[in-house]
Amino acid sequence: EGINPQEYTGIKLKVIEWADAAKEQVKSIPEGSNVYFVAATLRPETMYGQTCCFVSKVITYGIFKIREGEYFFISDRAARNMAYQGISSGWGNVDRVAQVSGADVIGTVVNAPLSAHGNVRILPMETVKATKGTGVVTSVPSDSPDDYATVKDLAKKADYYGIKKEWAELEIIPIINTPKYGNLVAETLVTQMKINSPKDAKLPDAKEEAYKEGFYHGKMIYGEFKGLPVSEAKDKVKESLIKSGDAFNYAE
Ligand code: A2H
């Protein structure tokens, strides 16, 4: 963990239908409760473009009671941090009601706030780190080179990953336009830089370039803040998500 705090937006993706492999393990959650996969993002303005949400198959997550009727699917580490940020009820209190492997939730249907697609699937990503954010990463393949490389790989090797190909092939809708890379920044960079795997060593450079070009020169072409520069829309989208109860601030 670095010296400077990282300010994330926690995005709440509500469970609509658990994958079969998870059903037995979530039985202890009271009927009628809401369970959310919480993704940590630095780019709340891109949430219109969510096409799926990633977990790691090799991380064991917890389902934590946050308050009456509300549960989060996140890493143990994130639950501990959130308990000291006033996110969960009871200062410092961590109430884990289930332990579930990321592998068992693949295929779960969740509702992604603001996404043009509405409901999306939980899919596997091998490069998710247990030591960052919540261990849950929402996927925006229009603007994140990592996400783009991962969804392409998932679709190409769907059988190997144990998923249905169509789960990884939701339409990639343009949401931000930039002078340099057009309106699908991630696709343009991945193609130009000849990146052909989610583990390609050029991805950190692509990620940096996409982030800078998007933030300093990008303009929203989708959603409530269409026409605004990304640098202005970022906080507005975040505030709107917080106001609707779909997001919160999370630092680490
Ligand atoms: B970002 P930083 Cl559109 N493991 O959100 C791997 N990656 C993780 C993670 C984890 N445990 N937790 C969060 N992340 C991702 C959107 C996005 C992001 C876009 C473009 C770039 C981008 C949609 N995915 O990140 O190391 C999350 O993906 C590139 C900077 O703390 C989060 O924001 O700087 C970002 O990495 C946090 O990365």
Image (tube, rainbow, N blue to C red):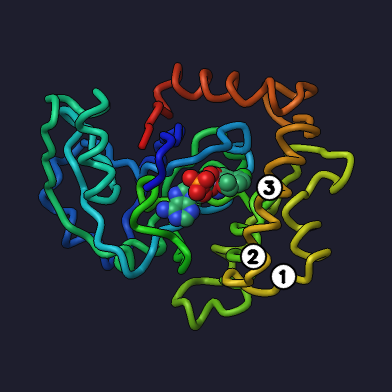
Q: Earlier in the sequence, mark 3 or mark 1?
A: 3
* Residue at mark 1: 195
Q: Residue at x 37, y 42 (%)?
A: 38
Figure check: 99 above or below 6: below
Q: Is residue 230 left or right of residue 72?
A: right
- Establish whether ligand 1 lies closer than 8 Å to the Cβ of label 2: no
Q: Is residue 225 above or below residue 153?
A: above
- Number of marks in the rendered image: 3
Q: Amino acid at mark 2?
A: Ala
- Pointers 1 and 2 in contact (C-beta within 8 Å): yes
Q: CA distance from mark 3 to mark 1?
A: 15 Å
- The three-letter amino acid code for the residue at tag 1 is Ile
Q: Position of residue 98 (x, y in %)?
A: 15, 53
Q: Nearer the viewer, residue 20 or 154?
A: 154
Q: CA distance from mark 1 to mark 2?
A: 8 Å
What residue appears at the point 64 percent right and 51 percent down from the top-left corner? Answer: 144
Residue 229: mark? none
Which residue appears farthest toward the front when viewing the image?
3
Identify the disc placed on residue 149.
Answer: 2
Q: Is residue 230 above or below residue 51?
A: above
Label 3 beta carbon less than 8 Å to ligand 1: yes
Say which element carries label 3: loop
Compare marks 3 and 2 and give the one earlier in the sequence: 3
- Image quarter of the C terminus: top left
Q: Residues within 10 Å of mark 1 (few under 14, many from 20)?
A: some
Answer left or right for 219 relative to 45.
Answer: right
In the image: residue 46, left or right of residue 173: left
Residue corresponding to mark 3:
143
The earlier-in-sequence mark between 1 and 2 is 2
Q: CA distance from mark 3 to mark 2?
A: 11 Å
Residue 164 in picture, x, y percent from top left: 51, 71
